[in-house]
Amino acid sequence: MNLKHLREEVLEANLEIVRRGLVLYTFGNASGFDRSDGLVVIKPSGVPYDELTPSHMVISDLNGKIVEGTLRPSSDLATHLALYRAFEGLGGIVHTHSRYATAWSQAQREIPCLGTTHADYIRGPIPVTAPMPAQDIESEYELNTGNAIIRRFKTLNPLETPAVLVAGHAPFVWGVTPAEAAHMAVVLEEIAHMAFVTFTINADAAALTDTLRDKHFLRKHGANAYYGQN
Ligand SMILES: [Zn+2]
């Protein structure tokens, strides 16, 4: 993949999360990672979405050294970089403060897998990070946000659980491409909304059985996936 294409893809992912109503003002960011040259493309900090062009995108190496771009990168860059360094196979990350997913993050409650819409994308509950200790907030906060996510995934496969709720903050989601990550952000918000409504109707609603959950997840993502046209 060339960087010109990745800049356009990252811009498009940033515009998609706005179009889908997940982002107010500049409360969100999308990035993309090209593993072949080790470079990350991310939205600049604080530029209104309707003024963004591919040339505004900031390019960083995996250690946060800016290699192209005159604008400051999104302040969450260090979180994105930590996740690209830790999780194999990620090519795009999206962070939003979308209403329902953020409400679950603030409530510090994981979202159980209540239905097949959820199981089509995520093989299990959507986890919540542990609250961050004061010293992790006082210095290198964005890096430590990434580290809190990485700790929560010690026993989880990030490709089977492409979403996380940061306690007291909001979700981060990812995918193989920036477009896939943006899609996941939209799906997560819908799942979070549906789970809220489900528990409103029945506070004792049960999670899917492992059998039904895996049927849905694996027919789309397993080694013998048969959903869709591929
Ligand atoms: Zn945030």
Image (tube, rainbow, N blue to C red):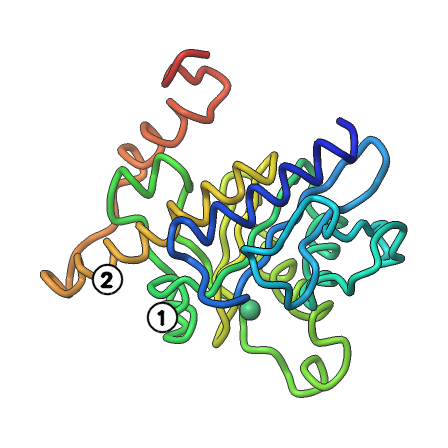
Pick out the residue farthest to the left.
Answer: 201
Foreground pick, 147 / 177: 177
Mark 2 C-beta to ligand 1 under 8 Å: no
Eyeballing the image, is 90 above or below 185?
A: above
Would residue 157 be seen by someone viewing this image from the given angle?
no
Q: Tell me the quarter of the image containing the N terminus.
A: top right
| Residue drawn at (64%, 62%) of the image | 151
| Residue drawn at (54%, 37%) of the image | 179
Mark 1 C-beta to ligand 1 under 8 Å: no
Residue 195 percent across, percent down from the top left: 25, 56
Image quarter of residue 10: top right
Task: Verify CB contact (< 8 Å) between mark 2 and mark 1.
Answer: yes
Foreground pick, 220 / 153: 220
Q: Secondary structure at mark 1?
A: helix
Residue with the mark numbered 1? 103
Residue 230 percent across, percent down from the top left: 46, 12
Q: Rate crowding at label 2 as few (under 14), some (14 to 19) or many (20 or more) other CA atoms within 10 Å.
A: some
Q: Which quadrant of the frame does ligand 1 lie within?
A: bottom right
Q: Amino acid at mark 1?
A: Ala
